[in-house]
């Protein structure tokens, strides 16, 4: 692979509250490492409306160029407007590779871009191996039981799982420059129309963003049990998570679900309390740095993956654990 095939382009996903997703900074750091080996330039593209301040802030993260695509049609994510804007930018930038965090938006947008520009696509990557000839991207497959390596050639698109890489470091001085792009979107005939948009304000820390997660499973037994988990989470400054059964039984909201059909997480510490360790749940949390399991069944599968484990009911173990943590914090 040679650097003359164009820059490496990172998509900065803007959230409703006018900030960039944390996965962007993690993806950017990984791309900086790759680009350094091949002597490629690292460029960023920002979509949105009135997001010039975001583009200016990204200049503090050691990038060559920030492409600012500021347009009223891009204020909120719309697949057709985003794809049209990206295609126009792509034809000008001519990147060798496109990177983005593995978010809900990316899951929808990345395949559209790949089809439109005839690029290969590798999703949900958690690592990579590089040499002078090629990059091998690593991703979990078969419910995270196997790590598979994929190689491809430019142009290609990569989505990277959150919490798999350390975030890029902010610099005091600004780097590179901003290039404003003006896509022609007014005459675009879109087929998708939004009639109503509902925003749900999440209280507390989201599982996707948390460094510590306290998750409960069927063994918690009730919504009242999850209130006790919430107390431990508050003590730790953690997010509350759950496996699929508590969601189905209405004990806790769906946004807490971790697993193959929920959030994919990789926190520093994951407490799996009353969780047996099904394949579907392990697919969502197996990349956690440390796993602490509490289960009354000493044969539970979760103990095979846990770094620390305690056999017993959560009613027995949780109060003592919470008290010990509180006393340690005071000390």
Image (spheres, helix red, strand yellow):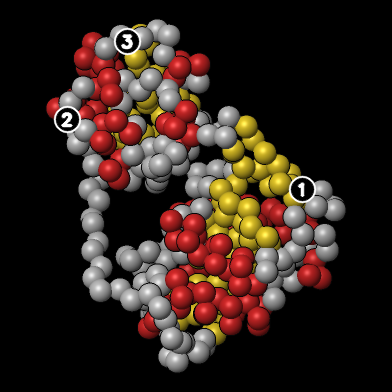
Task: Inspect this view and state whether residue 210 appears.
Answer: no
**In which quadrant of the rendered view does residue 115 lie?**
bottom right
Residue underneath mark 3: 296
Q: Residues within 10 Å of mark 2 (few under 14, many from 20)?
A: some
Residue 253: name its quadrant.
Answer: top left
Residue in the foreground of this view, choosing between 223 and 280: 280
Is 59 displayed left or right of 218 in the figure?
A: right
Report if the CB atoms under discs 1 and 2 are less than 8 Å apart: no
What whole-number distance in Å separates the C-alpha atoms at marks 1 and 2? 47 Å
Position of residue 276 measured from the top left corner of the image (x, y, whole percent): 38, 20
- The residue under the point 47% across, 28% down is 279
Question: What percent of the width, then of the height, locates residue 154?
Answer: 75, 64
* Total numbered labels placed on residues in the image: 3
Q: Earlier in the sequence, mark 2 or mark 3?
A: 2
Q: Which residue is mark 1?
A: 130
Res 193 seen here: yes
Disc 2 to disc 3, C-alpha distance: 19 Å
Residue reaching furthest to the front: 191
Query: Is 151 placed above or below 80 here?
Result: above
Q: Looking at the image, tell me whether mark 1 or mark 3 is earlier in sequence order.
A: 1
Q: Secondary structure at mark 2?
A: helix
- Mark 1 or 2: in front is 2
44 or 90: nearer the viewer? 90
Residue corresponding to mark 2: 223
Q: CA distance from mark 1 to mark 3?
A: 44 Å
Q: Secondary structure at mark 3?
A: loop
Most extreme residue toward the left, as rendered? 224
Taking depth in this image into account, of 254 and 323 the one nearest to the observer is 254
């Amino acid at each position: 692979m040679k650097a003359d095939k164009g820059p490496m382009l990172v998509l900065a996903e803007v959230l409703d509250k006018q900030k960039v997703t944390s996965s962007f900074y993690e993806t950017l750091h990984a791309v900086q490492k790759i680009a350094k080996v091949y002597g490629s330039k690292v460029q960023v593209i920002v979509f949105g409306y009135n997001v010039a301040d975001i583009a200016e802030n990204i200049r503090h993260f050691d990038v060559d160029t920030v492409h600012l695509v500021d347009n009223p049609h891009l204020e909120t994510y719309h697949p057709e407007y985003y794809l049209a804007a990206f295609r126009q930018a792509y034809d000008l930038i001519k990147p060798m590779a496109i990177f983005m965090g593995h978010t809900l938006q990316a899951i929808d947008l990345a395949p559209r871009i790949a089809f439109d520009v005839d690029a290969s696509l590798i999703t949900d990557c958690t690592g990579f191996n590089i040499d002078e000839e090629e990059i091998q991207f690593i991703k979990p497959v078969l419910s995270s039981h196997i790590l598979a390596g994929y190689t491809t050639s430019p142009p290609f698109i990569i989505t990277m799982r959150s919490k798999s890489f350390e975030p890029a470091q902010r610099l005091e001085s600004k780097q590179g420059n901003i290039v404003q792009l003006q896509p022609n979107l007014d005459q675009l005939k879109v087929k998708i129309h939004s009639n109503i948009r509902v925003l749900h304000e999440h209280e507390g820390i989201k599982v996707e963003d948390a460094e510590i997660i306290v998750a409960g499973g069927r063994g918690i037994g009730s919504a009242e049990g999850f209130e006790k988990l919430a107390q431990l989470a508050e003590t730790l400054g953690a997010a509350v998570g759950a496996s699929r059964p508590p969601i189905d039984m209405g004990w806790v909201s769906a946004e807490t679900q971790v697993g193959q059909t929920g959030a994919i997480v990789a926190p520093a510490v994951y407490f799996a309390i009353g969780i047996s360790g099904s394949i579907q749940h392990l697919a969502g949390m197996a990349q956690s740095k440390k796993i602490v399991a509490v289960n009354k069944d000493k044969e539970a599968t979760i103990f095979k993956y846990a770094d620390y484990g305690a056999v017993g009911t959560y009613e027995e173990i949780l109060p003592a654990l919470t008290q010990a943590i509180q006393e340690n914090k005071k000390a």
